[in-house]
Image (cartoon, grey):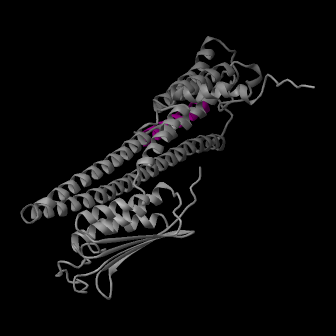
Amino acid sequence: MTYRQPSWGPSLLRAPLACWREGGASFQDGVLAVVLALLAFAPTLSNIGAQLGDLPERPAGVLSIVLTLAQTLPLVARRRSPAACLAVVAAAFAAHQALGFATTFGSVGLYVALYSAGAHQVRFRGSTAAAASAGYVALAFVLNRLGSPLGPADFSAFCLTLAAIWLVGSSVRVRRAQEAERRRLAAEVATAAERARIARELHDVVTHHVTAMVVQSDAAQFLITSAPERAGEGLVAVSDTGRRALRELRYLLGVLEATGENATGENATGENAVGGNAAGEAAHAERAPTLGRATDLVEGARRSGQPVEFSEQGDRRPQPVDVELAAYRVVQEALTNAMKYAAGQPTRVSVHHGGERIEITVITDGADGADGADGSSQAAPVPHGPGPQGGRGLAGLRARVRMLDGQLDAGPRPEGGFEVRATIPTKPLQE
């Protein structure tokens, strides 16, 4: 036995709701004004509305129809020109009450116009409120002179109702302004964080490869006169280092382009935009430096004349891009500092793959066992270079590792030399 899906249901409401959301403020206000105008002439709703004068009722006519429409149709501009909308609607309401026409649902337009003025009026808010108050006092005086049975308490109660509606609109306006300010501050913080991240990436890429190329070029210049047959090897090393630098810079520029597309691609629609971003991120992830390529860093340092020993323990498992990149940058920054501040000194790189973390240790020996604390030793790694006291290298790297809930320690060793030790928690790579 089969059941037919009912022809009515939530699915039928999706198209009108989507049309309502996509129509914009002008479309929504226009629909609201037309609906209120039509409901104003519905007999069943004639007793619902704002009634103030209680004057003897006059028969409806063309003027009453015009005043009713004047209380509803101006709402089409309630957000674009809230003060003008309130002035027209309030004047029509006052004339409607003073002439003693029967109450209609269209008088609700006064409440909507008052709320809109409180929520959307930006300039001359005080003047608008003062003019509305003066107009209400004048209307109360006119109604009293025309024989309205209402007393001061009744007029005051209606005035408090109108003031409450204005305050509701004002509170909505304040909340929107606070939300806009919060989004602005969040955007500024995100922009500052992105600039810091880009600065760290550029430092890590440029400093390492440029340092290696400088060392290799100096060695090649020395070998041209002392050992010309080996000078070619130094020039090849410079060329290889330059190519690696270009490859990493292309990767970094690709990441920046993807970030810009994500930030400015709000007009992209549907699943195609999402799929395109996902495909771009996957492509960048494939080109991202990983810990598995740390041997390239070691080989590059060796070509620059730095004696480096590399050891790796444990089973290497695929990790997320941010973990792999952070581990790669730790090895890169440590070797860069070794080549800059302890050229030619033995350096040991150790990578241990644990079940829950990756531990990286880079130790560079000093020339004579001095710690170089005063920066006078030319061979030993000094704290003001690779240490946390200067530059953005290790400081930025420490922030990168900390964002992954890891820890990075760097400093001189008691027995001489310099040590960089990083612990990065690992995460299971999900398909």
Main secondary-structure element of the magenta-colored stretch? helix
**Which one is in front, 224 or 405?**
224
Q: Residue at coordinates 50% horizontally, 41% vertically from top-left?
A: 278
**Which one is in front, 270 or 118?**
270
Residue 19 x %, y %: 60, 25
Q: Is residue 289 above or below residue 307?
A: above
Segment tinted magenta in the rendering: 124-144
Is any atom of residue 64 visible in this view? yes
Q: On the image, which quarter does residue 40 sit in?
A: top right
* 10 relative position to 410: left or right: right
- Most distant residue in the left direction: 225
Q: Is residue 219 above or below residue 18?
A: below
Q: Residue at coordinates 38% horizontally, 68% vertically from top-left?
A: 398
Q: Residue at coordinates 28% horizontally, 59% vertically from top-left?
A: 203
Is any atom of residue 145 visible in this view? no
Residue 356 x %, y %: 56, 69
Residue 253 x %, y %: 33, 45
**Which one is in front, 201 or 222?**
222
Q: On the image, which quarter does residue 346 sit in?
A: bottom left
* 273 relative position to 66: left or right: left
* 251 relative position to 97: left or right: left
